[in-house]
Amino acid sequence: MSMPLESEQKIKRPQNAERPFPWRCRHCGNLEVQPGTTRYTATVRHDGRLHTFDVSELRLPICRSCGELVFTGEADRQVTEGLRSHLNLLTPDEIRAALARLGMSQKEAAGRLGVAEETLSRWVNEFQIQSRAMDNLLRLFFTFPVVREALSGDAPVGDEVLRPVAG
């Protein structure tokens, strides 16, 4: 049994490794896809509504022949970051910093907020964007000690809270 020549051996790369440019364009077929930067207008559904916003400098592969944009995980991350900025939601870094400032674990914070620990982890690790309502709750939770205390489960509930509001 003969060994394949070095030129015939497949070069193995880590699964996440970028392949070298230029790439072949799936739209026009030309070997003209190169890294580039463009202004991009995105329309994304979040919280049941469509939001349109601009990403001023989206970095992604672009075909120099036909202009086709090739979306990668990094490009998707930039669009997500643009949406979060457009909606003025807390960033993962801001959530992590607030938890650190309070000396609170994700598990403890998730328990007090009434969300699964995995949900909070997805917000912190950029896999999911929190809803506007949850962003509002996070802001209150991080800002006001009385809110954290009330959500601890140890806070006494006064009679006025339990009485129905007169109509």
Image: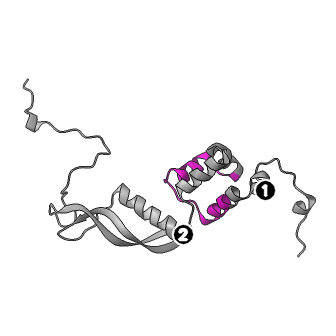
Q: Secondary structure at mark 1?
A: helix
Q: Secondary structure at mark 2?
A: loop
Going by the numbered disc 2, the residue's amino acid type is Leu
Counting from the top left corner in percent of width and height, residue 106 is at 62, 45
- Residue furthest right in the image: 159
Counting from the top left corner in percent of width and height, residue 143 is at 69, 59
Counting from the top left corner in percent of width and height, residue 111 is at 69, 47
Counting from the top left corner in percent of width and height, residue 147 is at 76, 57
Going 59% across and 63% down the picture, which residue do you hit? 131
The residue singled out by tag 2 in the image is: 87
| 158 sits left or right of 134 in the view | right
Q: Which residues are magenta?
A: 113-139
| 137 sits left or right of 68 in the view | right
- Give yes or no for residue 125 being in the magenta stretch: yes
Going 25% across and 65% down the picture, which residue do you hit? 62
| Quadrant occupied by the C terminus | bottom right
Q: Which mark is residue 146?
A: 1
Q: Main secondary structure of the magenta part?
A: helix
- Residue furthest top in the image: 1
126 and 165: which is toward the camera: 126
Tell me which label, 1 or 2, sits earlier in the chain.
2
Going by the numbered disc 1, the residue's amino acid type is Val
Tags 1 and 2 touching, CB below 8 Å:
no
Q: Is residue 38 visible?
A: yes
96 and 117: which is toward the camera: 96
